[in-house]
Image (cartoon, rainbow, N blue to C red):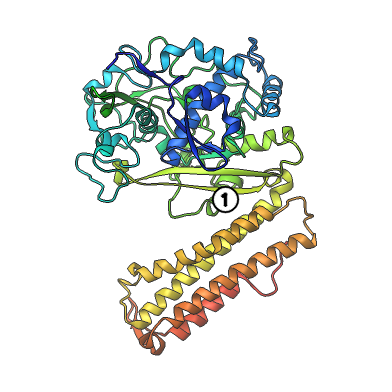
């Protein structure tokens, strides 16, 4: 076992997918320079992919804030410089080799996974921290000493040890998404909360290949300043000669994206054995900053902080809900709602649209998120989703359509509520008590079934919208009418199935007293009539589509 071993710039550790769906393993250098040859990152989890994407972007931000694509020193001074550089990178169709190789060569010694003084994303100060096994480091397993996964794709040796390449991937993941279960060693220290990415409702732009994804998300101008200014000097975590090693250190909000993307949310130290396997790690809380109004972060959706009106309008990252499809959060990500704030990557897409070819009509966004348990103490779930639609939906041309899409999503919510009420009333008619009926699985399933069945039709409808249709065009009216017919038809069919499977007791029905001792008669036929009334209120036969 060598003291200095496994350099991330030379060794293969990043998983990438080819167009034939096979997966290769590349070094960080090759993953950047060959990004045009691969479709996407292909790590064990979508959240791990985001961690690696942000590392790759940190390199690109650092390089292209200082050098031209030809490798000449050329700092970015203003918005024109940045826009020209971004366009040149995009039009090249691949990342330039000279500036990337030369920069990475200059920081080569900072990328050793194992090093006695500066191991990558680690510090010796973490040795006193909470000790975990490899099964906790592995995010696909994420076991702790008091929480064992009963059903897991990894068993035996796979859970107890990791290769260096696996450990490198999971090191980034743990730094970004670690839960709050570790205990501080110092006294009276603030709580940093979950890792920075775990606090976010992550959203990124997705291209047709890895190169496009990288350059799409390469935000060279400050979105907080309406893209009129460049960022502060780039300062990724590997560059400072004296890194911060303090436990649970509150730091100023970064003013550049490479520092943000490599934020050391945790102090970490990998433990390995003589067989060149990582068998565990030690952890302390690391750097953090206030998440409220942290608009430096471009890759999150936002929501208004409630109960703080006296302090003025403030926003915080809005975590995704694993039970909600991405399109149902459309207004938070893409519509300027009163209680929301547009993500930086969405604003950037609107900004760069003018630099994209006319043929580039569609844009895709992806989300990836961790769902934590109580008080973020452990990870319950990891999930991802994506959405594709016309780029003009993000511009002034698409303003009318954005409002219309939000309206249609609200109608879907009303239809789901109507189905839930129908299922509830049928259960009451069949004999369930009012106290327990909402806990019945069949009631929740009615909503879930509706959202499941309209999911693909809604995505197809959204992708087919062309905002360049006139506001009074026949195409616009037909598109809205066809969608409403589809949504209503699916809801009616699910409602009919609920009634048909209700059983004799529910068909006959019974009287049920409410809290005020008033009786109401419930039966499946009556419940279905009420359901149709609600559905017709949501989708009237003669509805104005303006």
Residue 34 appears in the picture as rendered: yes
93 to the left or right of 180: right
The location of residue 234, given as percent across then percent down, is 53, 18
527 to the left or right of 428: right
Classify mark 1: helix, strand or loop. helix
When asked about the image quadrant of residue 475, the answer is bottom right
The location of residue 100, given as percent across then percent down, is 57, 17
185 to the left or right of 238: left
Q: Is residue 335 above or below residue 434?
A: above
- Viewer-proximal residue among 510 and 195: 195
Mark 1, residue position: 330
Taking the spot 51% from the left edge, 15% from the top edge, the residue there is 104
- Viewer-proximal residue among 58 and 292: 58
- Total numbered labels: 1
Taking the spot 23% from the left edge, 45% from the top edge, the residue there is 148
When asked about the image quadrant of residue 288, the answer is top left
Residue 183 appears in the picture as rendered: no
- Quarter placement of the C terminus: bottom right
When asked about the image quadrant of residue 250, the answer is top left
Taking the spot 42% from the left edge, 28% from the top edge, the residue there is 13
- Viewer-proximal residue among 271 and 156: 156
Crowd around label 1: few <14 · some 14–19 · many ≥20 (10 Å) = some
């Amino acid at each position: 076992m060598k003291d200095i071993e496994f350099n991330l710039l030379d060794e293969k550790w990043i998983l990438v997918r080819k167009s034939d769906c096979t997966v290769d393993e590349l070094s960080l250098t090759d993953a950047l320079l060959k990004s045009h040859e691969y479709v996407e990152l292909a790590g064990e989890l979508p959240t791990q992919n985001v961690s690696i994407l942000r590392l790759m972007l940190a390199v690109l931000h650092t390089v292209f804030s200082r050098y031209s694509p030809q490798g000449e020193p050329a700092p970015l001074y203003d918005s024109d410089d940045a826009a020209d550089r971004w366009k040149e990178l995009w039009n090249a169709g691949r990342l330039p080799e000279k500036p990337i190789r030369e920069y990475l060569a200059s920081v080569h010694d900072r990328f050793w996974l194992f090093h006695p003084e500066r191991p990558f994303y680690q510090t010796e100060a973490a040795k006193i921290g909470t000790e975990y096994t490899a099964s906790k480091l592995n995010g696909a397993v994420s076991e702790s000493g008091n929480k064992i996964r009963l059903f897991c794709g990894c068993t035996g040796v796979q859970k107890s040890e990791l290769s260096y390449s696996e450990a490198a991937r999971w090191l980034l993941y743990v730094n970004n998404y670690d839960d709050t279960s570790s205990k501080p060693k110092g006294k009276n220290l603030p709580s940093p909360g979950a890792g920075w990415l775990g606090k976010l409702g992550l959203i990124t732009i997705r291209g047709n290949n890895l190169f496009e994804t990288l350059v799409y998300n390469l935000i060279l101008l400050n979105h907080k300043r309406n893209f009129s200014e460049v960022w502060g000097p780039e300062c990724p975590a590997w560059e400072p000669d004296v890194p911060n090693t303090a436990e649970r250190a509150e730091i100023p909000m970064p003013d550049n994206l490479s520092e943000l993307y490599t934020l050391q949310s945790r102090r970490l130290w990998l433990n390995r054995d003589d067989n060149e396997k990582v068998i565990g790690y030690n952890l302390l809380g690391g750097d953090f900053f206030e998440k409220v109004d942290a608009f430096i972060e471009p890759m999150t959706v936002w929501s208004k902080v409630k109960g703080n009106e006296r302090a003025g309008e403030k926003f915080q990252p809005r975590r995704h809900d694993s039970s909600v499809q991405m399109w149902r959060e459309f207004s938070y990500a893409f519509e300027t709602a009163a209680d929301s704030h547009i993500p930086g990557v969405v604003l950037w897409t609107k900004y760069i649209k003018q630099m994209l070819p006319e043929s580039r009509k569609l844009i895709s966004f992806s989300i990836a998120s961790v769902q934590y348990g109580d008080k973020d103490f452990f990870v319950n779930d990891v999930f991802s989703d994506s959405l594709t639609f016309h780029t003009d939906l993000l511009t002034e041309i698409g303003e009318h359509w954005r409002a219309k899409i939000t309206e249609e999503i609200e109608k879907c919510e009303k239809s789901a509520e109507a189905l839930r009420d129908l299922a509830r009333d049928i259960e009451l008619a069949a004999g369930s008590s009012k106290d327990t009926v909402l806990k019945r699985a069949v009631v929740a399933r009615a909503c879930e079934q509706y959202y499941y069945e309209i999911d693909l039709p809604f995505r197809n409808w959204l992708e087919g919208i062309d905002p360049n249709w006139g506001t009074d065009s026949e195409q616009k009216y037909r598109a809205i009418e066809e969608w409403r017919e589809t949504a209503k038809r699916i809801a009616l069919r699910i409602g009919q199935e609920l009634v048909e499977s209700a059983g004799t007791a529910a068909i006959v029905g019974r009287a049920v007293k409410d809290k005020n001792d008033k009786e109401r008669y419930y039966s499946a036929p009556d419940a279905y009539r009420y359901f149709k009334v609600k559905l017709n209120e949501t989708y009237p036969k003669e509805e104005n589509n303006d």
